Image: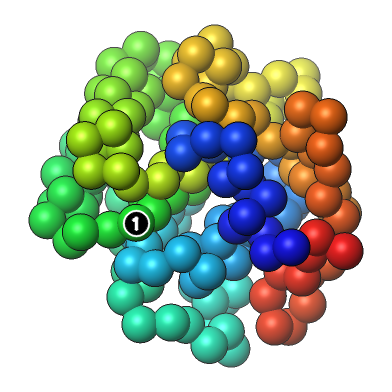
Amino acid sequence: MKISDFVFEKGSVVSLYGVAGSGKTNIILQVINEITPSLYISTEGVSYQARVEGIRWKKDVYFANTNNIFELISIIIKATKLNLKLISVDTINRFYRESRKVKDIEYPILMLLALSRESNVKVLLSWEVAGNNRVSGEKFMRKISEDILRVTKNYIIGNLRVCKFKISSNGVEGCL
């Protein structure tokens, strides 16, 4: 089974969460390469670019970086013109974690939900876990997500289902 089939098995708006280094970004990069045209938006800087090198990317896979909430909203607005099948944001709760302002998570999420409903676009969001092993903005995550998946170093864990994965030089292999 492809990772994208497992991730979107139960809905079109899916959230991944897990501690730093658990594989969330690698899983998202794999999914955007399986479902095209797609857009990967990074709020965590350019650290993902090292993972991008060496992967054979399909045509119509786009990448964007954002440093603040205004850039994120602008990128989402521009994405409406690209006729995408998938938009991913890695990580959606970064600006909320820094500011603790509800609007910093509410506005982009509402825009993504509207885009998903109106244009039949799949949305894949990653959520960083805080030091107390809780998702920052967990109430938002639970309210908006059709499915929530926990990522550990070797497993994607959903409601009554599990996918074992392996990260290799060719990307993410799974469900094993």
Percent position of residue 43, x then y: 41, 47
> Tag 1's secondary structure?
loop
Task: Tell me, yes or no, if residue 139 can be seen here.
Answer: yes
For the C terminus, which image quadrant?
bottom right
State which quarter of the image contains the N terminus. Answer: bottom right
Q: Circle 1 sits on which residue? A: 85
Amino acid type for the residue under numbered disc 1: Lys
Locate residue 108, reporting x and y percent.
Answer: 29, 31
- Residue 90 % position (x, y): 49, 47
Frontmost residue, 127 versus 79:
79
Compare residues 12 and 68 and report the one nearer the observer.
12
The residue at 40%/58% (across/down) is 40
Q: Position of residue 115 (x, y in %)?
A: 24, 37
Residue drawn at x 73%, y 83% is 169
What is the count of numbered marks? Answer: 1
User: At 59% across and 66% down in the image, what residue appears?
Assistant: 30
Q: According to the image, what is the colour scheme of the structure?
A: rainbow
Q: Residues within 10 Å of mark 1 (few under 14, many from 20)?
A: some
In the picture, measured across the screen, residue 85 lies left or right of residue 75, that is right
Residue 43, visible in the rendered structure: no
The quarter of the picture where residue 31 lies is: bottom right
Q: Reply above or below: 49 against 128.
A: below
In the rendered view, tell whether residue 161 sits above or below residue 140. Answer: below
- The reply, left or right, for residue 100 in relation to residue 134 is left
> Residue at 47% of width from left, 35% of height from top?
13
Q: Is residue 1 left or right of residue 63?
A: right
Nearest the viewer among 70 and 39 is: 39
Quarter location, residue 114: top left
